[in-house]
Image (tube, helix red, strand yellow):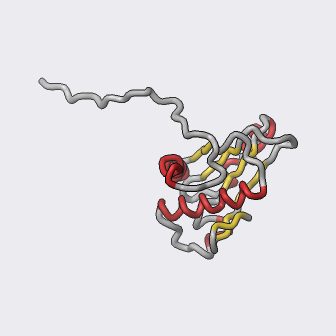
Amino acid sequence: MLRAGSVELSGLLAEPATPPRALVLALHGGGMTAGYFHGRAHPDLSLLRLGHRLGFTVLALDRPGYGRSSSFLPRGQLLSEQADTVYGALDDFAARHATGAGVFVVGHSYGLKLGLFLAATRAARNCSAWTAPARRTGTSPRWTPARPRRN
């Protein structure tokens, strides 16, 4: 359990035996739980097992309104409120666990939206787990929208 103010968040945790390279924060989409990242159909489908094997701490967090917090937050939270709650939970986590080089966020569906919001607003927050700079990967450094064709 991680505490963020009056909210307790549940999730799944895998930690390596040695100090972690970094913390992988996995955020699930709507209608899912943290178990989404621990594919129980086959061991090769688990992000937790993979991260552990590669030396990462993996925290698959139940987003606010899911898992343990569902009874406390039956209507969930707005995106900005979820970010506040997750930042609080990360502070709680970092106070008790090593985070290595910082936080790497993985998100599925709405969890990605929350992850992007966390990364975009991290400079304005004082979250102890965010030690590494945010980096963009898999995108072109410049993107120009296509211009409509004229006939």
Q: Position of residue 15 (x, y in %)?
A: 80, 47
Q: Based on the displayed image, in which of its 4 quarters is residue 149 positioned? A: top left
Query: In this view of the protein, which residue sits in the foreground, 13 or 135?
Result: 135
Residue sitting at x 68%, y 44%: 24
The residue furthest left is: 151
The x, y position of residue 5, in whole percent, is: 63, 71
Q: Is residue 46 visible?
A: no
| Rendered location of residue 84, percent (x, y) | 55, 62
Residue 117 visible? The answer is yes
Residue at 62 percent of width and 75 percent of height: 71
Q: Residue furthest right?
A: 17
Seen as rendered, the residue at the extreme top is 151
**Which percent across, then down, holds residue 131?**
64, 44
Name the residue nearer the viewer: 48 or 6.
6
Picture mark count? 0
Image quarter in which the C terminus is found: top left
